[in-house]
Amino acid sequence: MSGHSKWATTKHKKAITDSRRAKAFAKLIKNIEVAAKMGGADLSGNPTLVDAIQKAKKTSVPNDNIDRAVKRGAGLSGESVDYMNIMYEGYAANGVAIMIECLTDNKNRAAAEVRTTMSRNGGTMADPGSVAYNFHRKGIVVVPHTENVTEDDVLMAVLDAGAEEVVDEGETFDVFCEPGDLVATRTALQDAGIDYDSADAAFVPSLKVEVDVETARKVFRLIDALEDLDDVQNIYSNYDITPEVQAELQADEE
């Protein structure tokens, strides 16, 4: 789930099951395969692959699975990998914008499953471009909170690497930059001895929509259903929730 709601992240972590873990592993493996296909298996010359592997390791994907994915993607195992990247646009409850990024080997299957899931969970599909105009692509490096690292430490480390801002999200510091500055930004953090959880290019909304608790429940129910689809890789949305709504949602989980 992408959209930079730490509540959603926590919610999904709490609700994780074996089936969800297997799906998460499969999606991370796809990322590795695509990165290896695009840039080769040599980590020193393929920063996208480095980030894909790091993200998989942080999620406890076994090293054997990672190694096989690299070889498969780079064509070193005799297997072929051929995925298409497709973006679908739509709306959840009360006009909340949704962008659904798929990585698939079957465009027709992906389209049918996304459309069915949207209609069954209160969502509606939108024409290409009608939602995307409200989002812009940014590089985001997620740095976990630790006792020894402050917001100023992160800011000082990335200031000369092209970073635009550092946002304290409670459990993490999110470092925003242009996608082209992503490698330089995460390298600057490494050089400063600061660990990071992930470094990705993502779609960030220009304008967020504050939602009440009922709308939030409907939006998360739709996102949950979409995330269960094998072809769905990332979901971006422009919802915004207040601490009060977050507290009510958290009570639902207890």
Image (spheres, rainbow, N blue to C red):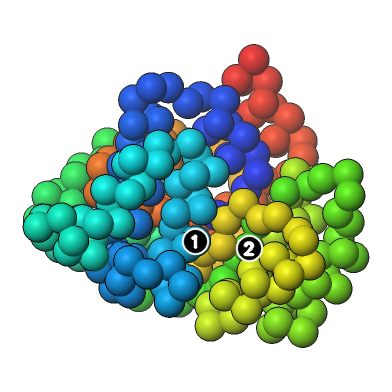
Q: Counting other residues with Cα less than 10 Å from the Cα at mark 1, is it few (<14), some (14-19), or many (20 or more)?
A: many
Q: Position of residue 145 (x, y in %)?
A: 79, 47
SS for dot 2:
strand
Q: Which mark is residue 185?
A: none
Q: Residue at x 38, y 30 (%)?
A: 20
SS for dot 1:
helix
Q: Position of residue 34 (x, y in %)?
A: 29, 63
Could you tell me if residue 222 is visible in this image? no
Which residue position holds label 2? 141
Discs 1/2, front: 1
Mark 1 belongs to which amino acid?
Answer: Asp
Q: Which quadrant is the C terminus positioned in?
A: top right
Which residue position holds label 1? 51
Q: Is residue 173 above or below residue 14?
A: below
Q: Position of residue 148 (x, y in %)?
A: 89, 49
Q: Is residue 119 above or below residue 4?
A: above
Q: Residue at x 76, y 74 (%)?
A: 158
Residue in the foreground of this view, choosing between 173 and 101:
173
Could you tell me if residue 8 is visible in this image? yes
